[in-house]
Image: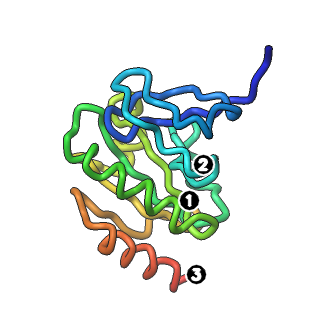
Amino acid sequence: MNQETIVITCSKCGAKNRVPTAKLHDRPLCGKCHTPLSVHGKEALAVPVTDGTFSREVLASPEPVLLVLWAPWCAYCRMLAPITEKIAIDFEGRVKVAKMNVDENRAVPAQYTVQGVPTMLLFRDGKLMDRMVGVLSKEEIERHLKALLRLS
């Protein structure tokens, strides 16, 4: 029984949940904290990125990338998660939203001198274009994204 699955990161606790695509319409819950998982669309969810996939998912991306660096223990990161999920949905097809857990991935945060979480890095054509630190409103993050898109 080989089903297609996707991995959905819980916006509340950060746990990774493997969900069969056939069950996406059943409003799946996080296996750890039982919070409903956001399943707006497979492509609309923030893409999990690791040190190993960073070059492919971020630097080689044909579209601009908002990389959110976060940690599961960080309350501010949990506050930011639903905002970045909404941005992933609103900017689908124009900006890729990606997330990197800094506890599991140390090389990329060190390379970009990330000193605290949450930190958001904006990339275009493989280059770091902007940096945002802390919990920002959806509108403030959108201002940064729209400015980046105007430069394209």
In front: 114, or 35?
35
In front: 50, or 22?
22
In this rendering, is residue 128 above or below 6? below
Between discs 3 and 1, the one toward the N terminus: 1
Q: Amino acid at mark 3?
A: Ser
Callout 2 crowding tier (Cα within 10 Å): few <14, some 14–19, many ≥20: some
In this rendering, is residue 110 above or below 62? above
Q: Quadrant of the N terminus?
A: top right
Q: Amino acid at mark 1?
A: Lys
Q: Which residue is mark 2?
A: 57
Q: Which residue is mark 3?
A: 152
Question: Which of the two discs, 1 and 2, sits closer to the camera?
Answer: 1
Say what secondary structure mark 3 lies in. loop
Q: Position of residue 106 (x, y in %)?
A: 37, 34
In front: 29, or 97?
29
Contact, mark 1 vs mark 2 (Cβ under 8 Å):
yes
- Measure the alpha-carbon separation of dots 3 and 2: 19 Å
Classify residue 11 by image quadrant: top left
